[in-house]
Amino acid sequence: MRHLRIEAFRVYSIVLILIGHTLYFAEIDLSQPLAKAFAYSIAILARPTIPFFFILSGFFLGGKILDAPAKAISIAHKYTWKLGALFLFWSAVYALANPYRSWTLLTENPVRLIFEGTQIHLWFLASLFLTVWLFALWPFARKSGTFLALGGILFVIGLLGGPYRFSALGLDLHFNTRDGIFFSTIFFGIGVWFHSSKPNVSKATATWIYLAGITAFSIECIFLWSQNRLNPLYNDYVLGSIPYGIGLFLIAYRFEATRLDKLAAPFAIYVLGMYVSHMLVIDLLLKPVHKLLSPVLWQLTGPILLCLLTLAITWLVGRTRLKRLMGLD
């Protein structure tokens, strides 16, 4: 049985991601104070969404593996076959859309091509693919906390090689630690732990964890900006991402579905399709169009256009035999 509020929060999350990518990748002029304030606010509000998706994957998919350990390989294979097919297909699509970028990645940074595909947002599919198999093949007791401990170690290494790379303890890994298993493992493990322990967290506690998370994340971003001139738009994750992602999950999990949640939940089946296809809409349609509009008008209309177009494309393809290309079964 579907959890309506969690399904709704998947929809809210993809909307935030699409708004953020519209502002970031469509070359918005941030010289205006209003535009900058809006872009940074969206960047902050959207940051727990990817941790949220990884926690959900651990909670549901990792939970299946936890409940049926003898079927771990078959469960992982069934799910990651779909992820891998989407990654390869959409990498081919984006390679055709921008062959120059793909050739540059292939010749100058093939490792990045492996972990991100031919368009940057596909990193999520590759990361989830690897994390699922890491958990399925985990040689120790999956309930023992060792997987979560590994996630913590990888997360710290990722921080030192990522947002804290310019600090005294920073690491120069020559690798974007958002990719691979550095970022994803701890959140997947947290999702598995939630599935196993079913924590009875009160609504007030869930709210306070979320508020503590957004506060910690924001303060950390300000600190990194002041110390290392690291723009908040580029902070994929920081230490505060942990309570921020947990808080978003708990608010979705512990509260009853509202009327808006019930309206939004049915659209959750289109989330994956909207995610894989939205950069194509940005590159081919929105980038040319936004130059015709004022920055203020574009901030209001661009995200709406992207959400509606990607939803329409996913829905239309979903009505054909090609629906699996949008992650629809």
Image (spheres, rainbow, N blue to C red):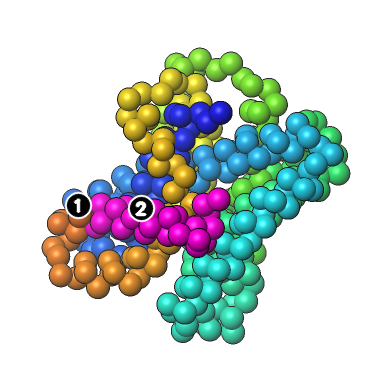
Q: Which residue is mark 1?
A: 300
Mark 2 surroundings within 10 Å by alpha-carbon count, few (fewer than 14), some (14 through 19), many (20 or more): some
The residue that appears at 25% across and 52% down in the rendered structure is: 304
The residue that appears at 78% across and 43% down in the rendered structure is: 72
| Res 1 → quadrant | top right
* Amino acid of disc 1: Leu
| Res 135 → quadrant | top right
The residue that appears at 53% across and 54% down in the rendered structure is: 327
Which of 151 and 26 lies nearest the eye of the viewer? 26
**Secondary structure type for disc 2:** helix
Q: How many marks?
A: 2
**Residue bounds of the magenta highlight:** 302-329
Mark 1 surroundings within 10 Å by alpha-carbon count, few (fewer than 14), some (14 through 19), many (20 or more): few
Q: Which residue is mark 2?
A: 311
The residue that appears at 80% across and 31% down in the rendered structure is: 144
Q: Is residue 125 above or below residue 288?
A: above
Q: Position of residue 16 (x, y in %)?
A: 36, 46
